[in-house]
């Protein structure tokens, strides 16, 4: 058995995919009021072409995600405290 040429198993970066990814399917199932559609779209984009995103953009997105998480955790804590 001869070794494969380097990169022969890789799909071209520009090759279109005809079927939705698992992330896109899960995203469509979770959609409710449409309030967070932009976040779902961002998730799909990161998962579909994450290797093409510049490092600076990944860093900025990571910071933003942490800020959103912090804000949501604080909001959830306040809501839960109100229930008690």
Image (cartoon, rainbow, N blue to C red):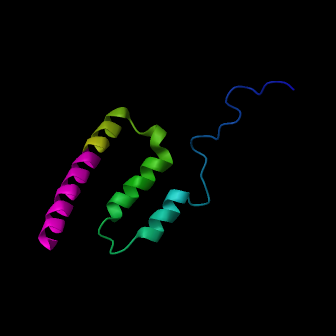
Q: Where residue 67 sits in the image (x, y, percent)?
A: 22, 48
The span picked out in magenta is: 64-84
Q: Residue furthest bottom?
A: 33
Q: Residue at x 57, y 44 (%)?
A: 14
User: Considering depth in this image, is 1 or 81 the residue closer to the camera?
Assistant: 81
Q: Residue at x 67, y 30 (%)?
A: 7
User: Considering depth in this image, is 84 or 46 the residue closer to the camera?
Assistant: 84
Q: Please tell me whether residue 81 belongs to the stretch shown in magenta.
A: yes
Position of 80 with respect to 30 (left or right) is left
Q: Residue at x 34, y 58 (%)?
A: 39
Position of 41 with respect to 21 (left or right) is left
Image position of 34 with respect to 54: above or below: below
Q: Where residue 35 sits in the image (x, y, percent)?
A: 29, 69
User: Considering depth in this image, is 56 or 22 the residue closer to the camera?
Assistant: 22
Predominant SS of the magenta segment: helix
Q: Please tell me whether residue 17 belongs to the stretch shown in magenta.
A: no
Quadrant in which the C terminus is drawn: bottom left
Q: Residue at x 62, y 40 (%)?
A: 12
Position of 22 with respect to 69 (left or right) is right
Q: How many marks?
A: 0
Q: Where residue 8 sits in the image (x, y, percent)?
A: 71, 33
Image position of 2 with respect to 17: above or below: above
Position of 49 with respect to 7 (left or right) is left
Q: Where residue 69 sits in the image (x, y, percent)?
A: 25, 52
Quadrant in which the N terminus is drawn: top right
Image position of 30 with respect to 6: above or below: below
Q: Residue furthest right?
A: 1
């Amino acid at each position: 058995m001869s070794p494969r040429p380097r990169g022969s198993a890789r799909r071209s970066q520009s090759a279109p995919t005809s079927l939705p990814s698992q992330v896109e399917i899960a995203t469509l199932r979770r959609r409710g009021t449409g309030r967070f559609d932009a976040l779902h779209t961002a998730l799909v984009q990161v998962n579909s072409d994450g290797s093409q995103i510049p490092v600076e953009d990944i860093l900025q997105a990571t910071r933003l995600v942490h800020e959103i998480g912090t804000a949501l955790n604080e909001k959830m804590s306040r809501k839960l405290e109100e229930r008690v």
